[in-house]
Amino acid sequence: MKKLLPYMKKYMGYAVLSPILMILEVVADIIIPYLMSLIVDVGIKNQDIDYIVKIGLLMVASAILAMVFGIVSAHFGARAGFGFASEIREAAFTKIQTFSFANLDQFTTSSLITRLTNDCNTIGQVTMMSLRMAIRAPFMMLFALVMSTTINASLARVFAITIPLTVFFIVVGIKKATPLFKEMQTRVDRVNAIIQENLIGIRVVKSFNRQDFEENKFKERNDALRDTALKAISLIILIMPLLNIIIYSTIIAVLWFGGQQVSAGTMGDGELISFITYITQIMISLMMMSMFFLQFMRGTASVSRISEILNTESEIKEAQNPVRELKDGSVRFDNVSFCYPGSQEKTLKNINFEIKSGETLGIIGSTGSSKSTLVQLIPRLYDVTEGSVAVGGVDVREYDIEALRDQVAFVLQKNTLFSGTLRENMRWGNENATDEQIIEALKHAQAWEFVSQYDDGLDHWVEQGGENFSGGQKQRLTIARALIKSPKIIVLDDSTSAVDMATDAKIQQTFKEDLGDITTIIIAQRISSVQHADRIIVMNEGEIESIGDHNTLLKISPIYREIYESQQKGVVGQ
């Protein structure tokens, strides 16, 4: 919590005023039973109507003050609690944006969603309860104990038994419930994971008619969450009747012994009534404290999960005085090896090659040959395990990360578009891009041919994930978005796989003729996508098998020749 407390700074005024007002509410509530005893023992006993009215008005005033203090305290507590949670959520989201791919591999997407939503909400609720219930309960109990002892010290001895007994049941309940609350958060992660997976892949589910299978899978995780929640709630359900038994037993004991004192004339009727009211307030305070601590334990689990995000440092560290300008788009891999975090197995081994600025390099190889991993080292999405990667003659670890990634445009295998207009999506590459620049980039990516057909043009709406576009259209749009950055290096990671061969050829021609000053790295499965590159790297099991142009590789690389011949047979067969 010490790490999280600075996020309360913006709401500190509310956080201070809420408990103060809560204490004032408690004082007003505590006065009411005492005033009630005066009405019975003095006003009614002496038949003094004026006194009854005067004390009655004080009771009404106390009740109104308690209500006002309670309402304002609740408002301030909610502002502080959920404002605090919103600041933490924003900080956690901002922190996630700094994560390297290695950091993101540590967390599942569903877990991050749960932490930013469910866990932050829990922290907000616990904070609000801490400012109100955690203040009200102990102060109410303390003041009620003082008042009951003042009224009748001998009768107040009953609390020496009831309070320790109540605390015992509360502690046992908390101890049993805490691990269940932690397990609940994990099970919420699992439910969110399957919801996310199913909604993203809903078209695949329907096309394979696997709704029943997915429903059963969801039911299994949902039932596990329900059962865990029921176990935790069952403990609370069990505690409440036990606490009620203690309360009613205490009241019976007070009525028995207090009744005897009333009969003996050592205690007034009103004092007995107010004493019983104070008993109720004390016991209710203990129940409130038990509810608070149970929720607090759940909040502790949430704080731990949020702190895990905030305490995670990016694997990618910037140099103290980073280089902020790339001289050119040349790239050099010098004896590079790479292992994914947590793995001892080398995914890339002894990679050595160089690309001149403006050159086009093709990369081809079988699935799992680490082609994508290779290029992800260029913009420092991962850092090398051994060796070095240099861009513009400077080790990428010496660059300012933002400056490096601004000049290295990356079109990933998974083409992601965001809900909004086409113009808004294109401006991810350059937020100040003009319509003319956007259209030029769309033309280079062979996307203007279908975008120009829309009546609303660049204002055409993009659904979440670009679901209203075909795979090939999304690929061309993401290429255009990358070109708008005007980068020195562009990496196309299997980015034309859904594009027909004729359009693919036009894209390659445009890159060669109109974008010759940009260093282009093309990862592809089709020979036709890379055969016109200046050089082609053939990858095999994380190593470079051969480097050369198309004709050279046909002679020296068995892997390249095999891929070429198999694809040529496919073309001839068609």
Image: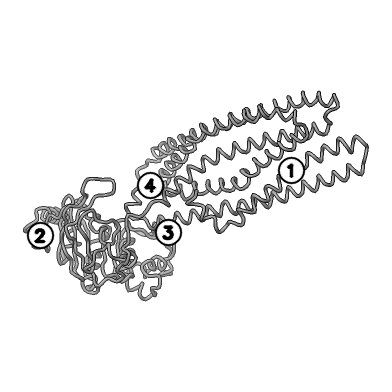
Q: Nearer the viewer, mark 2 or mark 1?
A: 1
CA–CA distance in space, label 2 to label 1: 89 Å
Residue 25 placement (x, y as % from top left): 71, 47
Residue name at image x 67 percent, y 42 percent: 139
Q: Quadrant of residue 270?
A: top right
| Foreground pick, 168 / 174 | 168
Name the mark nearer the viewer: 3 or 1.
Answer: 1
Give the alpha-carbon distance from disc 3 to disc 1, as whole Å. 56 Å
Mark seen at residue 463: 3
- Whether residue 496 appears in this view of the structure is no
Amino acid type shown at disc 4: Thr
Q: Is residue 97 left or right of residue 395?
A: right
Nearer the N terminus, badge 1 or badge 4?
A: 1
The residue carrying mark 4 is: 108
- x, y percentage for residue 538? 15, 56
Q: Which residue is mark 2?
A: 553
Amino acid type, callout 2 = Leu
The CA distance from mark 1 to mark 4 is 49 Å
Q: Residues within 10 Å of mark 1 (few under 14, many from 20)?
A: many
Closest to the observer, 548 or 128 = 128
Q: Please, is residue 361 above or below residue 344 in the view?
A: below
Which residue in the protein does label 1 denote? 29
**Is 129 drawn above or below residue 273 in the view shown?**
below
How far apart are the two marked residues, 3 and 2, measured between alpha carbons?
43 Å
Indicate the amino acid at tag 3.
Glu
- Label 1 sits on what residue type? Asp
